Amino acid sequence: MEEQSRAEGFDGFVAARWPGLLHLAHLLVGGDRHRAEDLLQEALVKLWFVWPKIAEEAPEAYVRQVLARAAARSARRRWWGERPVEQLPDLAAAGDMSSAVAERSRLEAALAQLPPRQRAAVVLRYYQDLPERQVAEVLGCPVGTVRTHASRGVARLRRILTDVIEPVG
């Protein structure tokens, strides 16, 4: 019966947190939905094995840490194969939401241009709203390094987004 209780608790956590964790993984890998799904599944497998120990503590923090570290590791590996891309939705058909979707897509595309550690620091610090100390724990680096990565990442995002807005002429 204990195994069933363990499975139910884990299943409940995954069902409740899947969308948010998938979005985090999506941002951490630079917008590749397939890599994000793979990354999240790997993180949840690791969570399953430690579930009895951390189920009552902080399972989301554990998954966040696994995601951030795995995203940084996978970014260092070079990919030589095909990379599928999805077609963008027709923004005119989206109605009132089109500008919000377009803005979010622009931001996600800009995030994808950041180096993995900067992207992780920016996403964890500003999207997940984690304090610098917690981001440092997740990334396994000093708080000062988090500040540097976040500061440089935000500055680069500003440059990227400003370059897109300003007409070239």
Image (cartoon, rainbow, N blue to C red):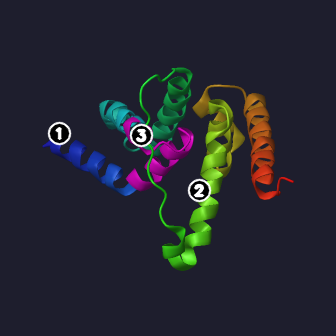
Q: Residue at x 30, y 53 (%)?
A: 12
**Dot label at residue 100:** none
Choose between 52 and 154: the one closer to the eye: 154
The reply to whether dot 3 and dot 1 touch (C-beta < 8 Å) is no
> In the rendered view of the protein, which quadrant contains the N terminus?
top left
In the rendered image, is residue 84 in sight?
A: yes
Question: Which kind of residue does numbered mark 1 sit on?
Answer: Glu
The reply to whether dot 1 and dot 2 touch (C-beta < 8 Å) is no
Choose between 147 and 96: the one closer to the eye: 96
Which residue is label 3 attached to? 84
> Is 6 on the left-hand or right-hand side of 86?
left
Q: Which residue is drawn at 24% across and 42% down?
A: 6
Q: How crowded is mark 3: few (under 14 residues within 10 Å), some or many (20 or more)?
A: few
Q: Distance between the residues labelled 3 and 2?
A: 17 Å
**Dot label at residue 105:** 2
Question: Which kind of residue does numbered mark 3 sit on?
Answer: Pro
Q: Which of marks 3 and 2 is nearer the N terminus?
A: 3
Question: Which kind of residue does numbered mark 2 sit on?
Answer: Ser
- Reply yes or no: does residue 101 show up in magenta: no
Instruction: Report the magenta residues as a range.
Output: 17-38
Q: Which residue is drawn at 53% across and 29% down?
A: 69
**In the orientation shown, which residue stands out farthest toward the left?**
1
- Look at discs 1 and 2 and give the one toward the viewer: 2
**Secondary structure type for disc 2:** helix
Q: In which quarter of the image is residue 146?
A: top right
Q: In which quarter of the image is residue 42?
A: top left
